[in-house]
Image (cartoon, rainbow, N blue to C red):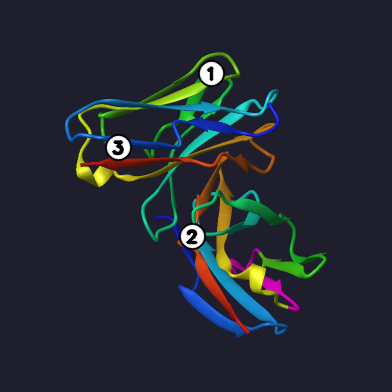
Amino acid sequence: GQNIDQPTEMTATEGAIVQINCTYQTSGFNGLFWYQQHAGEAPTFLSYNVLDGLEEKGRFSSFLSRSKGYSYLLLKELQMKDSASYLCAVRDWGKLQFGAGTQVVVTP
Amino acid sequence: GAGVSQSPSNKVTEKGKDVELRCDPISGHTALYWYRQRLGQGLEFLIYFQGNSAPDKSGLPSDRFSAERTGESVSTLTIQRTQQEDSAVYLCASSLAVDYGYTFGSGTRLTVV
């Protein structure tokens, strides 16, 4: 079966760092994506990993370990506008399979 | 167009009626995807198109759901005899090819009453 697991909710303070973990078991793997989704809006692309290691893009970094079926998204210097749902997605034979999303709440 | 366009943005329909949801992908994007998102939940894959063929329609929940795509352009998702459990946001996305990232539309919020 397909399983993509991530925590339901995380709370952090403005200026802090938050790490969102994602573990997956899928029939195929051709890359892992992270998307950000604000309430009532469409998801927007954040990052993509297909090889093991860390990809850094400004305040956001994403890590992948294919042997462990594990990824994380690291958000640094949190801002209030980062309050959103963060979706982990695995490309599986041409389509993306999404996790249920992690709601990040940033407090002042 | 500049982005993925979906219409209508909101649709309220009576149980038992048929509805058609439309998606206009980004020009030149060969791959097109439909997802469903129930309130507070993740994205549920429905079907994807490569050109106008559908290599994977495994996510369609029942035979009341169907989709088609003309050429490498517009796609319509049709739900027949709607049920209350069909209430959700239906999201469309397109990509240059299946190996590329998606751009999502703003979705159609369907409410079946």
Q: Residue B108 versus residue A53: which sits nearer the camera?
A: B108
Q: Are marks 3 and 1 in contact (CB under 8 Å)?
A: no
Is tag 3's residue or tag 1's residue first in the polypeptide sequence? 3
Amino acid identity at mark 1: Asn
Examine the image and state in which quarter residue B27 appears: top right
Residue neighbourhood size for the residue with mark 2, other residues' Cα within 10 Å, grouped as few (<14), some (14–19), many (≥20)? many
Examine the image and state in which quarter residue B20 appears: top left
Residue A29, horizontal then vertical, whole percent? 59, 51
Helix, strand or loop at mark 1? loop
Helix, strand or loop at mark 3? strand
Amino acid identity at mark 2: Gly
Q: Which residue is mark 3?
A: B12
Q: Which residues are magenta?
A: A66-77
Residue at 25% in and 29% down: B64
Q: Are marks 3 and 2 in contact (CB under 8 Å)?
A: no
- For residue B78, side relative to residue A26 (left or right): left
Question: Does residue B45 sit above or below B21 in this rendering?
Answer: below
| Numbered tag placed on residue B52 in the rendering | 1
Residue neighbourhood size for the residue with mark 3, other residues' Cα within 10 Å, grouped as few (<14), some (14–19), many (≥20)? few
Residue B89, horizontal then vertical, whole percent? 41, 45
Q: Which residue is mark 2?
A: A99
Asked if the magenta segment contains residue A63, the reply would be no
Examine the image and state in which quarter residue B101 appears: top right
Nearer the observer: mark 3 or 1; the answer is: 3
